[in-house]
Amino acid sequence: MYLRGSKWSMKRRRQPINFFRILLLLLLIAIGVYVNKVVIPTVPPPFVPTPTATRDPESYIAEAEGLFNQGKLLQAIELYQEAIRIKPDEPATFIALARVQVFAGQYKEAQTNTENALLLNPNNSMAHAVRGWALTQEEDYLAAEAVLKRALELDPNNGIAHAYYAELLGNMFLDNTGPFDAITMAGEESRVATTLAPNSLEAHRARAFILEITDNREEAVQEYQNAIAINGNIADLHLALGRTYKAMTVFDKAIEEFTLANTLNPADSTSALYISRTYASVGEFAKAAQYAEQAVKVAPTDPYLRGNWGVMLYKIPDWPSAVMQLSLAVNGGAAEDGQAIQPLTLTGDDTRLVEYFTTYALLLARMNRCGEALLVARLILGSVPTDETAVYNAQESMRICQNNLLTPSPLPQLSPTPGMTPTP
């Protein structure tokens, strides 16, 4: 039997395959795979900050070197530290950072970074050399000598290490420590340094320093100028050149160099102190007092700077302000912001220090504050009995006080220097 009209007929014709539809489906599948594998991984997830590409540490180092050449030591230090953060396994970067830190006066930090370099490479001659230089600046001469000898043992041709060793020997000579022939050795080391490293700032600096302390000042000036020609933006070099000019009594050039050093590094009180003393050398005490005050503002807890300011105020004269500053130097006290000022200890090694105490004793006597004056005078006689000038001034203070007892005289009416407001 046949069923007519049934849709289940076994004789129904099959539809032809649509190849275009198949190709379209394959294309869509391929596009999906591409998006999933290639596009999606490059798209940042929503609400997550886009990461910043890591900068090549070499670019930080190059920029840091440029800043050092411009005298921008603190900025150079920051960039070296950033380079180390990215690549902490490179000894040369730690050494370069430590070198700049010594120039910037960050001696402890420099030691730490040279030690970091030595952890990576214990036989790195330059790491030992810069560490020895940092120790020299902290006056740890015995440790510095051992470290610098190790640097030269590792590399006898390290000219910069020879320069650092020459500087150490020069400081030991001034400090009356070290080898008997320290200054002879220092001269030889400085000559070796300039031979091995003729383009090194440190080599010319060390040679100049040895020439300066041996009173070969004209040659020292030339060597300091050679160092400045390599990098004219290092304040320390201008301080040294100015110091040499001052010793040669070329005061105008000395002030010029000290002023340039002050401009390059206003955070260091040394330049203002040197300017103050140079003006005092030519009798310009008002200017001397101005720069002495500037030095105190940079380092308000330094009793040595307080003493210098007090002497300059005494010369103006501004006795009320002078006695206040000298009292802070001799007795200690509190700075304007409340920080503690430690008193100076009187020794005969520093003529300036002796001057602070003798000026204070004379000033107290002349202001008829004889109880205090006699105490200071006796301290001077007991502490520096072989200093003829100090002994004379102490005795003069006592004589003034004896005369005051016999014929009291009124205190001179002196007006403070404009701009200064001494506190009772």
Image (cartoon, rainbow, N blue to C red):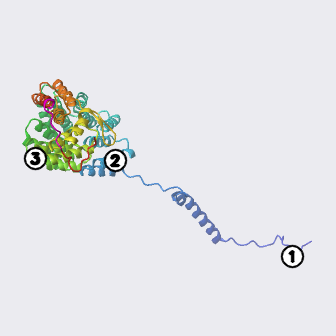
Q: Which residue is mark 1?
A: 5
The foreground one among 23 and 171 is: 171
The kind of secondary structure the magenta stretch mainly shows is: loop
What segment carries the magenta color? Answer: 404-413
Asked if disc 3 and disc 1 are in contact, CB closer than 8 Å, the reply is no
Type of amino acid under label 1: Gly
Q: Quadrant of residue 385?
A: top left
Whole-percent x, y for residue 117 in the image? 33, 37
Gap in Å between the C-alphas at discs 2 and 1?
93 Å
Q: Which residue is mark 3?
A: 251
Other residues around mark 2 within 10 Å, as few (<14) / some (14–19) / many (≥20): some
| On screen, residue 350 above or below 87 | above
Q: Which residue is mark 2?
A: 78
Gap in Å between the C-alphas at discs 3 and 2?
37 Å
Q: Quadrant of residue 217?
A: top left
The residue lying at 75 percent from left, 71 percent from top is: 14
